[in-house]
Amino acid sequence: MNLKRLTSEDYTPALRNEIIGLFQQLNPNIATIPLEAILKKDNSIILVVCEFNGTLVGMASVATYRVISGHKGMIEDVVVDKNHRGRGIGRALMQKVVEEALNLKVTSLLLYTGHHRIAAIALYQKLGFVLKNSGLYTLDLNSKPVV
C-alpha cells in the first residue's frame, strides 16, 4: 500500500480516469470537475490517494480555508474501491489527510457522511471524530436559487 499526496506534477489522463472511476463508486450521480483544476497550486485542496500494486484503490481530500473562527478543513470524497475494503485503507487515508492538515496548521476538521455509511461512521468515531449536534443546509447553485 502506497499513500501519496497528489500535486499538479502527478497529473496524467490515466490518473484522471482512475479517480473518476473511483469517485463513481462513492456517488455516480455527481459530475466531477477536471482533476487539473483540483491539483492547481492555488487551490487549497489536499488530495491523498492510495495505490496497491500500481492501481488506485482509495482517495480522500481536504478543502482548507481560513475564517474568523480558525483555519479549518472539510474532508471530502473519501472512498475505497469496493474490492479493497476492509484492509485498513480507509483508516490509512484518513490518518494521512489528518497528518497533512496538521502540517498546514489546520485547527479543526469537519466532515459530512450519510447516515447509511455505517462502516465509515465507525471508522471516523474510532479516529476521534464526534458527531456535532447541528444542522447542515445546502443550496444547489446549479438549480435556480430562490435568493
Image: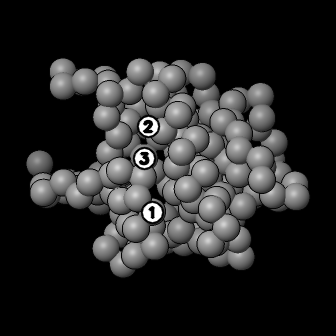
Side (left or right) of 147 relative to 101: left
Q: Residue 120's image quarter?
A: bottom left
Disc 2 + disc 3, Cβ < 8 Å: no
Disc 2 from disc 1: Cα separation = 20 Å
Identified by mark 2, the residue type is: Ala
Q: Position of residue 14 (x, y in %)?
A: 83, 52
35 versus 106 height, above or below: below
Residue 16 showing in the rendered view: no
Looking at the rendered structure, the secondary structure element under dot 1 is helix
Disc 1 from disc 3: Cα separation = 14 Å
Side (left or right) of 33 relative to 119: right
Which residue corresponds to mark 2? Answer: 63
Any mark on residue 123, and which? 1
Identified by mark 1, the residue type is: Leu
Q: Residue at x 64, y 59 (%)?
A: 89
The foreground one among 136 and 4 is: 4
The residue mark sitting in front, 1 or 3, is 1
Q: Residue at x 76, y 38 (%)?
A: 11
Which residue corresponds to mark 3? Answer: 75
The foreground one among 15 and 37 is: 15
Circle 3 packing at 10 Å, graded few (<14), some (14-19), many (20+), is many
